[in-house]
Image: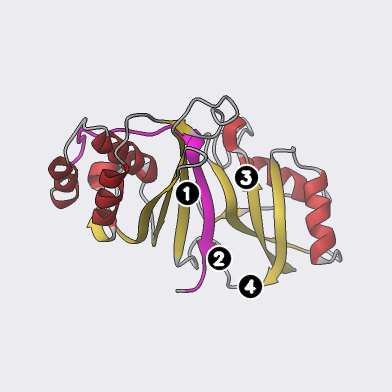
Amino acid sequence: MNRYKIKIQYDGSNFSGFQSQKDNSGIQNKIESSIIMLNNKNSVKLYGASRTDSGVHALGQVAHFDLNTNLSENDLKKAINARLEKEIRISDVSIVDKDFHSRFNAKSKEYNYYCTLDKNPLDIRNHYYVKNVNTEILNNISQLIIGEHDFLSFSKFSNKENNRCLILKSEWILDKSNQKLLYIIRGNRFLHHMVRYLVGTMIATAQNKINKKEFERLLIEPKKDAKIYKSPAKGLILKEIFYED
């Protein structure tokens, strides 16, 4: 019996997030169903590194499972992909130590969020259309997020006692030629919907809906049910899971 680590890419538009659902609409359901066919239809449990929400995408989701098979890693990848829907793809399969855990061994995660500044119909599906944005303000407030903070204000549904996260990277990149905005954030952990709340509230600040001091107060004086803005799921991508510092 080997433990396999897999890297997963998916367009989450038509799925109820990564986590398994009772109606089998989760991406985890789809991958487990494919692996089960390679295990004489016996149950196989897949453990994901991150529970991406409904509509969120991934280029670097990681998961692990245990399986007894004679297939090589490459052949196993091909066999799993052959039974998956076209929106889901296993990009890498490797044998790892038996004590490896995709979630608990992760050191940090990087998310990317994509915005478009024009109404190009080709971008509507997977970009958040925004207008009247001051990119200088965006870059200034993104730096406030770096470091360790209590992000309760940016997670309305959090019941966790510990809402502190260490953010290692937070920056906006403007591509003027293509009228695109990319936000990159990397941290040791993230609260429920946290990235989408941060993006939405930063954009609102850059549109003068709230001011910089109000944004900063959300970090300094965290509270439930704060006045924040939430960006849509379609622009969010889980880019990479890091297992080394």
Q: Where is residue 23 shown, x and y percent of the image?
A: 61, 30
Q: Which of the two labelled residues, at mark 4 and mark 3, occupies the earlier sequence position?
A: 3
Q: Where is residue 187 shown, x and y percent of the image?
A: 38, 60
As shown in the figure, which amino acid type bears the numbered disc 2? His
Q: Is residue 234 magenta?
A: yes
| Residue found at x 17% / y 43% | 212
Give the Cα distance between marks 4 and 3. Answer: 21 Å
Front-lying residue, 39 or 214 = 214
- Residue at which label 1 appears: 112
Q: Residues within 10 Å of mark 3 (few under 14, many from 20)?
A: many
Q: Which of the two labelled residues, at mark 1 and mark 3, occupies the earlier sequence position?
A: 3
189 lies left or right of 179 = left
- Residue at which label 4 appears: 98
Look at the image and give the residue range highlighted in magenta.
Answer: 223-244
228 lies left or right of 50 = left
| Residue found at x 34% / y 33% | 230
- Residue at which label 3 appears: 28
Give the Cα distance between marks 2 and 4. Answer: 8 Å
Q: In terms of image quadrants, where is residue 67?
A: bottom right
- Residue at which label 2 appears: 101
Give the Cα distance between marks 2 and 3. Answer: 16 Å
Q: Secondary structure at mark 2?
A: loop
- Kindly report which numbered mark, 1 or 3, lies closer to the viewer in this rendering: 1
- Kindly report which numbered mark, 1 or 2, lies closer to the viewer in this rendering: 1
